[in-house]
Each structure stands twice: as structure tokens, then as C-alpha cells.
Image (cartoon, rainbow, N blue to C red):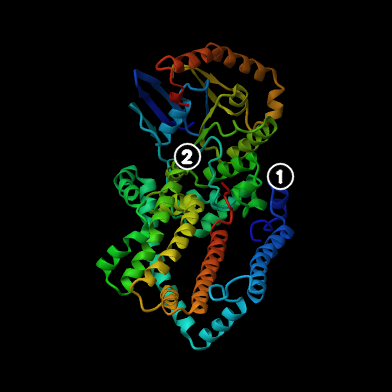
Amino acid sequence: MSVEASTPAAVAEQRSRARRRPSDATRDRLLSIASPVALFVLWEIAAHMHWIDTRFFPAPSSIAGTFGEMIANGTLLSNTLTTLERLAIGIVVGGVPALLIGLAMGLYRPIYALVDPLIAATYPIPKSAILPLILLVFGLGEASKIAMVAIGMFYPVVINTAAGVRQIDRMYFDVGRNFGARGWSVFRTIAFPGALPVIMTGVKLGAGLALILIAIAEMVGAQSGLGFLIWNAWQILQVNVMYVGLITIAVIGFILTVLLNELERLLIPARTRR
Amino acid sequence: MAGAKIVFESVEKRFALRNGEHVALGGISFDVAAGEFFVIVGPSGCGKTTLLRIAAGLEVPTAGRVRIAHGEGNRPENAMVFQGDSIFPWMTVRQNAEYGLRMRNAPQERIDMVVDHYLDRTGLRAFADAYPHQLSGGMKQRVSIARAFACDPEVLLMDEPFSALDEQNRTLLQDELLRIWDETKKTVVFITHSVDEAVTLGDRIMVMGGDGRPKAFVDVPFPRPRSVLDLRATLEYGRLFHDIWAHLRDEIPAARFSLRQPSGDAGVEAS
């Protein structure tokens, strides 16, 4: 990859730091595919042998059939897109202010002193518990769903960004000052890249939380989305549809994790391992 | 010889402690001539780093001031080579080296030209796209030196840049620094606790006492360009080394003592 192979001399220079060899990476990747496949196979067998109650745990093949139907008639796609759209907007609406506030908190002590108590006081409130309040304020439309996602994203990102900036060695800020970095340059060249590994952890946590919250938000007072699909399936006892919804959310969560890990690798090539 | 490049005017620095005050710098005055390689040597805790940070504008003196004469052109007043790992781990060697020029919005072609030159001079060209975690301690300090030279400051301030290196690397880097410096003849203020290093590099040495005051000024008569190794084989080198050690010997316990005395708090170490 880009860094390691850039110059032969650089490779030679590399300290004896333990590095993952490609063969290890391939093995890990295969193993992580094998475990879910094994689970499905076991489940299928158990259903056919009636070791489990197929009313509650229909065979994967039967769920796959429903999956196919729902793809064909478009209900799965439209509900998935609705959820993804809410997720995307909410992540931006919650994440961007969180990033900026977190950077400001990390850089300026008075801002930290001002904002931190508010965050510390509101953070422990279970986000699902404020859904009624959010519905009250934002109504039953899109705004309330986006607000829930944004709230889920906001806290981990703001907390991690502030913490990430505060753990940067003060010396780097001295270097910045000495070499003429002022204002926005300090954000851009020191605070943000220095805190990035910690920020990315916050983004991953936030995205996970956002996914949980969008499902909950869509179960209450929504007419579309995967959460609605699951809740509606329970109300009319279409267990297969429920599973399709669950699996789709799981897949979204998985893809989101993979994407964020890739993003992390792209953004932090130096991989300033902590 | 041009006039004074840096003027230290009764620079004083006190730190408030729980029970009283710690005087890190007790009103220091001296000049550094243009093009002079000025070395400050002193025991740890004598306030020499504080003095340098004041000159760099990173700290404000309690009293007095430091004036740096500006030459022609729009050059930065100073650039510092910091103690320890000060290059940004999230930037490549090249990005680190060009940092000062970027922050001053230098045109791209000038950045490329100057940075290429100093990467060559420091032997870092092949590592231009490497990240700091791939480099040894000596290489990292070379980046730090390239970064400081590249922005072409009025004066260079160096805060024990080689103190974390092993002796062989230190000798190598001293040699390289002398070569690069010979090309530019920048005014340098160099801090060290190593008498060896002071005698090897400096035109003039200020020996600082543990009380935060200058104890002696010593001229170093060696001609330039110097070779670190040849220098150390001369008798004169040994004599200078001995003289400076004689000044310092009395100061080292004093520095230790004065550190503990004010509060018993080791956290006040100023250097």
C-alpha cells in the first residue's frame, strides 16, 4: 500500500514494530466470513429437523424466499432507502456540529468549561427515553427521525473529539505557533489530524447508536422505514418479514462498519497507533 | 561583523508557587551577534529552556524583553528545533519539512525548491513520503532541523535537539548541522547540557548557573568549517572542555538544591 511501499529505503528503515502480514489478513477475513455462514447452516438444519419452533424461527431458506418477494415487489428497497436517507441526513446533522463543538472544546478551556457540564448532564439520559419528547417537538414527520439519529451521533462524536484534542501533546501546539499556524490552520493541521484516531472511534460509536435509534424511532409513529417494517410485521404476525427487516438492518450495520473502517484507513494512513 | 542580532534585556521569569516564588531566570542580559552560533550550557533546571521559549515568543517574561533584529524581506523572526519528538506524526516527512512555509503561504514552487534542498542536505530525500513512526530518532530530528531551516528564519533556536539521541547519532547530527549551518550562517541560539556539544558547535558559550543567571561567557576560537572528530583530537578542545566543566561543577548541586528548596515540588522544573 501507499506508505509502506513508497521507497525501498523507507521499508528498510522501518523499526522492528510488529506488522500484520498479508497472509494473516487474508486468514482473518476468511474466518470472519466463515462464522456467520456456519450459523446459517446450523439454523437451516435445526429448522428442518424441528429442533426449533419454526413459527418463531423460520428456516433461513424460507426467510430468503420472503426476502426475494420483497425485493421483487419493491417494499424492501423503498423502506431501506427511506431508513438510509434518514440515517445519512441525521449523521451529518449530528456529526458536523459535534465535530466543530468538540474541536472548540478541546482547544479552548473556557468553551470546555462552559459546554462540558451540559454534555455530562444530558449524556446519561437514555436516548430512546427522549423519543416522546422528540415526537412532541418535531412532530411525526421526518424531522423527528432525523433528530433521533443526530442525537445518537452527536454525543460520542463531541465527547471523543474534545477528548481527542485534549490528549494531543501541548508541544505540537507550540510547534504550530512557532511556525506561524493561527486560527483555522491550528484546527486543520494540528487539532483535527491529531485527534482523528480518537474522533473516528467516536464516529463509529455514534453510527452504531444512530442505527439503533433510527430503528426505535421508526417503530413509533412512522409509516415507512425498516423499523416500521419490523414493527408492522409483528403487529400482523408476519414473522418472515420481521426477519427480513432484522437482517437488512444487520447488513446495513455491517456495511457501515466496513465503510467506516475503510474511511479510517484512508484518513489515517500513518496509523498513529495509540 | 554585523551588530547584535538578538538582544536579551534583563529577562526575568518567576513562577508562582504555593509558598513563594521560584526564580527561573534572574534578569539576564546579553547580545548575540548576527551570524553567531551561540550556545547556552547549564545544568538541568537552570532555566535555559525557559529563556529560549521566551526568545521564541512561546512564553512571556515576567520582566525584560528579547529583541530580534529584522533583516530584509518577510522572513519569520525565529524557528525552533524542539527537544524530543516534535514532528507531527500525522504528516509525512515532506509535509513536516514544508510546514513553516505552508503556514506562511509561500508559493508552491518555492516550497518544493527549498524543501527538496533541505531534504537532500539532511539525507531525507528517500524518506520524503514516509511517516515519522517509520523513522529512527535521528531521522526524526533531521526532519525537525530541515523544517526549521526551510522556513528561512531570522534566527534559529535549538532546544537540546540531540539530547535524546545515542552518542554516535549525536556526533553524526552535530556534523551535519555544522555543514548545513556553514552554508547559511544563520544566527543560532543552541541549548544543551552537554559541554562536549557546546564546545563542538559554538562560537561563544554562555555557562548558566543554577540560580538562573549567567555564570561565564567563553569564546570558542576554533576555525570553521569544523569537523567534529578532528576538533575533539585537539589539545585546545580539552582545555576548553575542562574550563567550562570547572564553571559548571559548582552549579549542578546548586540547581538541584534550588529546585527542591522553594516548595519541595518537583513539578516546577523550568527547563
Q: Amino acid at mark 1?
A: Ser
Disc 1 chain ID: A
Horizontal side of residue A39 vs A193, given as left or right: right
Indicate the secondary structure of the residue bearing disc 2.
helix
Asked whether the viewer can see residue A180, the reply is no
Q: Quadrant of residue A174?
A: top left
Horizontal side of residue A244 vs A104, given as left or right: right
Q: Residue B118: give x, y in percent of width and height.
A: 59, 47
Q: Nearer the viewer, residue A229 or A58?
A: A58
Residue at far left of view: A137
* Tag shown at residue B30: none
Reply above or below: B187 against B134: above
Crowding at dot 1, Cα within 10 Å, few <14 / some 14-19 / many 20+, comes out as: few
Q: Nearer the viewer, residue B265 or A125?
A: A125
Reply above or below: A150 against B106: below
Mark 1, residue position:
A16
Residue displayed at 56% across by 34% down: B161
Q: Foreground mark, 1 or 2?
A: 1
Reply above or below: A174 against A216: above
Q: Nearer the viewer, residue A193 or A262?
A: A262
Residue displayed at 64% across by 57% down: A3
Crowding at dot 2, Cα within 10 Å, few <14 / some 14-19 / many 20+, comes out as: some
Residue displayed at 45% across by 45% down: A176
Mark 2, residue position:
A171
Counting residues from the start of the chain, the first of labels 1 and 2 encountered is 1
Indicate the secondary structure of the residue bearing disc 1.
loop
Disc 2 chain ID: A
Reply above or below: B154 against B109: above
Q: Amino acid at mark 2?
A: Met
Q: Do marks 1 and 2 both belong to one polypeptide chain? A: yes
Q: Residue B140: give x, y in percent of width and height.
A: 60, 42
Q: Residue A137: give x, y in percent of width and height.
A: 25, 66
